[in-house]
Every structure is written in structure tokens, then in C-alpha cells.
Image (cartoon, rainbow, N blue to C red):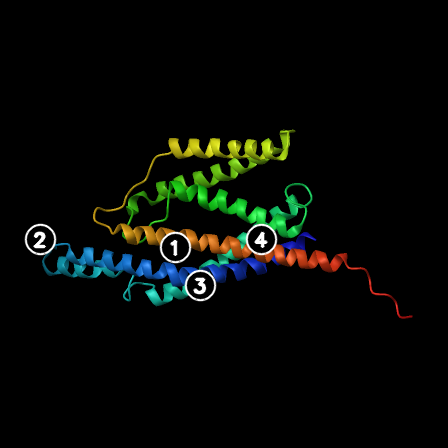
């Protein structure tokens, strides 16, 4: 049964990854192109050092093309690779989700496969995507110091761990509360928010947006980035739950009468 769930998770994750990739291509890539254009314009506008002569001028003129046609991997290839990246992301997430789903099935959450898949996907989105995103939102090219990428990545991973731990604490709290359903939900919500809010307040803030960077471009890029994840998890949860309900419905049908 676990093998069947894993195969289902891989296939549905791949499909959901392509759906999310389409969203990112339509709504995210234009913002990336605009940010790259700003980065290239800023690099081209930088004056060359007086001692560098012609070589310094050439460097300044080509530094802004790291993301463009003259890059090692050009923008057309990067855009095509977007679907490969989201597809691989869907495969990885689908396999892990299927294993977690198998562990939750019949033990936690709703009884039906469809409702459990939707609830699990929504919880994963909040814990793994929304919680770290609200503290450390995605930034387009030309935003962020390359020398701080390791520390920024580490902080983001910490927020992911905090989100997962908060979910575990919330589930444990809900199981311990013996009052009515509303009391359990309130207790679980408070148990989830306490470590999350504490991490938001205690972890350092990272703000490396350069002065003069268009606020609308930054906002639209972040919305597209979050929207891509929302589309993925929504598509994955709906498809995984729909297939699960269909399989459960077929297995619940009475056997066909024998004609012998």
C-alpha cells in the first residue's frame, strides 16, 4: 500500500510541479526579466576605475550580462529549465508527502483520503512555505548581497524547522486537550503561533533591498513567488485527494455477481 501511495505521490507531484511551473513562467519570469534589466543597467552605469583603462571599461560593460544571453546559461535555457526545476521539486515533495500521508492515515486528521490530503497539503504549505516566507520573503535578482547568501539560507532553513516543529506541537496539544472541538482548535492554534511568533521576533531581520529598487517590482515578484507555491500545494492536495477518494470509492463497491 505504501508503494502505491509513493508512486501516486510522485506522479501527482510531477504534474503539480508542471502546473506551478506554468504559473511561475507566466507571472514570475517577467518580474525576473525586469529585475535583471535593472541589475544590468546598474552594472553598465558604474564608472570604470581610472587605472583599469580599457579593461576596466570592458568589465563594467559586461558585468550586467550574467543573467542574459551571454551568460553561461542564457535566459531562454533558464526559462525552459524552470519546468525541469518545478517538476523535480514536485517529484521530491510528492514522495515525501506520500510517506507522511501513509503515517497519518487513520491516525490523525480527517478519515477520508480526500479531506486528509487537503488538510495535510494546507498544513505543509503553512509550515514549510508561509511561515519562513513571512520572515524572509523571496527576492528577485539584484537584491541581496552574494556574501550573505549562506547566512540567509541558514536563517530560512531555521524558519522551516520552526514551522514543522510548531505543527508537531500543535498536533500534540490538540490530542491532549479533552474539551470540545473548538477548544482543541484554539489550543492547537495558540500552540502553533507561540514558537512561530517567537522565532519571528528573535531571529535577525534581513533587509538587503538596494535603495531606489522599485517597490512594485519587489512586491509583484514576491507575490508571484508565493503564488507559485500556493498553486503547487493546491493542485497537489486536490489531485492527491481526488485520486485517493476515487480509489477508495472503487474498492468500496460490492463485487460483481457471478454469472456462473
Mark 4 and mark 2: Cα distance apart in space: 56 Å
Quadrant of the image occupied by residue 107: top right
Q: Are marks 2 and 3 in contact (CB under 8 Å)?
A: no
Residue 132 or residue 46, whichever sits in front: 132
In the rendered image, residue 8, in percent from the top left (x then y), is placed at 62, 58
Q: Are marks 1 and 4 in contact (CB under 8 Å)?
A: no
Which label's residue is closer to the chain start, 4 or 2? 2
Label 3 with label 1: CB-CB less than 8 Å:
no
How far separated are the C-alphas under marks 1 and 4? Answer: 25 Å
Which one is earlier in the sequence, the residue at label 1 or at label 4? 4
x then y, percent, for residue 132: 43, 42
Q: How far, Cα to Cα, is label 4 from label 3?
A: 21 Å
Q: Earlier in the sequence, mark 4 or mark 3?
A: 3
Label 3 secondary element: helix
Query: Tag 4, which secondary structure?
Result: helix
Q: Return the residue at label 2.
A: 51
Identify the element where label 2 is drawn: helix
Quick check: 27 left or right of 111?
Answer: left
Between label 4 and label 3, give the one nearer the viewer: 3
Question: Residue 22: which numbered mark, if any?
Answer: 3
Q: Residues within 10 Å of mark 4 (few under 14, many from 20)?
A: many
The residue under label 1 is: 224
Q: Which residue is mark 4?
A: 95
Amino acid at each position: 500500500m505504501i508503494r502505491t501511495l509513493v508512486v501516486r505521490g510522485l506522479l501527482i507531484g510531477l504534474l503539480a510541479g508542471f502546473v506551478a511551473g506554468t504559473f511561475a513562467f507566466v507571472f514570475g519570469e517577467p518580474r525576473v526579466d525586469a529585475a535583471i534589466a535593472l541589475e544590468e543597467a546598474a552594472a553598465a552605469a558604474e564608472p570604470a576605475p581610472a587605472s583599469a583603462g580599457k579593461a576596466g571599461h570592458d568589465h563594467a560593460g559586461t558585468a550586467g550580462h550574467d543573467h542574459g544571453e551571454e551568460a553561461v546559461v542564457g535566459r531562454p535555457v533558464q526559462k525552459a529549465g524552470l519546468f525541469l526545476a518545478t517538476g523535480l521539486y514536485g517529484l521530491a515533495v510528492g514522495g515525501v508527502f506520500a510517506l507522511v500521508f501513509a503515517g497519518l492515515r487513520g491516525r490523525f486528521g480527517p478519515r477520508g483520503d480526500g479531506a486528509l490530503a487537503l488538510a495535510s497539503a494546507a498544513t505543509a504549505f503553512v509550515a514549510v512555505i508561509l511561515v519562513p516566507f513571512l520572515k524572509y520573503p523571496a527576492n528577485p535578482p539584484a537584491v541581496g548581497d552574494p556574501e550573505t547568501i549562506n547566512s540567509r539560507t541558514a536563517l530560512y532553513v531555521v524558519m522551516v524547522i520552526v514551522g514543522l516543529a510548531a505543527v508537531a506541537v500543535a498536533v500534540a496539544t490538540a490530542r491532549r486537550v479533552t474539551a470540545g472541538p473548538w477548544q482543541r482548535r484554539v489550543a492547537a492554534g495558540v500552540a502553533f503561533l507561540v514558537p512561530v511568533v517567537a522565532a519571528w521576533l528573535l531571529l535577525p531581520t534581513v533587509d538587503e533591498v538596494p535603495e531606489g529598487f522599485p517597490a512594485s517590482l519587489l512586491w509583484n515578484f514576491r507575490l508571484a513567488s508565493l503564488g507559485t507555491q500556493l498553486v503547487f500545494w493546491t493542485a497537489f492536495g486536490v489531485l492527491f485527494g481526488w485520486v485517493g477518494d476515487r480509489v477508495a470509492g472503487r474498492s468500496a463497491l460490492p463485487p460483481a455477481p457471478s454469472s456462473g
